[in-house]
Image (spheres, helix red, strand yellow):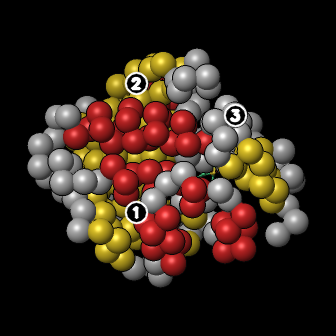
Amino acid sequence: MNDLEVQRTDDGTATLYVKSLNEHYHSVKGALTEAKHIYRDCALRHHTTHTGTQPIRLLEIGFGTGLNAVVTAMAADTTMPPIHYITLEKYPVPAAIIEELNYGSIVDTQLLRDIHTALWEQPVSITPTFTIEKRQCDLLTTPLPSDIDVVYFDAFAPEKQPEMWTPDVFARLYKAMRPEATLTTYCAKGVIRRMLQATGFAVERLAGPIGGKREILRATKG
Ligand SMILES: C[S@@+](CC[C@H](N)C(=O)[O-])C[C@H]1O[C@@H](n2cnc3c(N)ncnc32)[C@H](O)[C@@H]1O
């Protein structure tokens, strides 16, 4: 795909640049650093500190390169409840481009391969504690799964894809989430924070990843 270019971020891990949008899949300050801090630590690990041993239903908006998924699979050890990871993606990245990313040298290569070769539209068990369900669909029109505990809201930026950051989208996510479920996003803009609050979430501003954005948002369903 001519529209996608592999680039290196400041922590040495690769990301994709979308020429037509002038937008990256990850923070240029560090793709892996972002995946670990905003999603694994501020969402998943935060959630598991107060949920006990119940299996976790996690919803990702934007599978993209699969980096968030593999970082989550690596965290899903026996100290954590089993994770069912549902990820939505409208435009799957071609396998040839995934091959060009340098994630194989940074994350668990077998997990990375298994996640990328997992069939779409069905749950696939990757490890005893991590199942992935990749759905090729449009967030704006697809029915959302229910009883979600954790949401990784990783859409392209509001100024690039405003249709993904609307009261309607957040209301649908809110409805899909269980009480006390957690959503995190890298976007800390005031307009998005107020939209999440108007939806009914309690919203916190948290410190961003080291070397990256100053703040990120975590929204919790009351
Ligand atoms: C910021 S990137 C996600 C990066 C990804 N989480 C990763 O770890 O590589 C945003 C993703 O949302 C996808 N996307 C764009 N519009 C969408 C839509 N309407 N429904 C579902 N996914 C969409 C894009 O194709 C892209 O993969």
Q: Residue at x 64, y 36 (%)?
A: 11
Q: Residue at x 22, y 40 (%)?
A: 48
Give the quarter of the figure containing the C terminus.
top left
Q: Residues within 10 Å of mark 3 (few under 14, many from 20)?
A: some
Q: Residue at x 72, y 64 (%)?
A: 100
Which badge, 3 or 1, is on the more N-terminal residue?
Answer: 3
Quadrant position of ligand 1: bottom right
Residue designated by label 3: 10
Q: Is residue 215 depicted above or below 102 in this figure? A: above
**Where is residue 175 drawn, in percent x and y?**
34, 49
Which badge, 3 or 2, is on the more N-terminal residue?
Answer: 3
Q: Nearer the viewer, residue 202 or 26?
A: 26
Residue 6 visible at all:
yes
Q: Residues within 10 Å of mark 2 (few under 14, many from 20)?
A: some
Q: Residue at x 38, y 68 (%)?
A: 132
Which of label 1 and label 2 is nearer to you? 1
Q: CA distance from mark 1 to mark 2?
A: 23 Å
Q: Any mark on residue 86, and which?
A: 1
Q: Any mark on residue 222, and which?
A: none
Q: Any mark on residue 203, and which?
A: 2
Which badge, 1 or 2, is on the more N-terminal residue?
Answer: 1
Give the quarter of the figure containing the N terminus.
bottom right
Q: Is residue 211 depicted above or below 1 in this figure? A: above
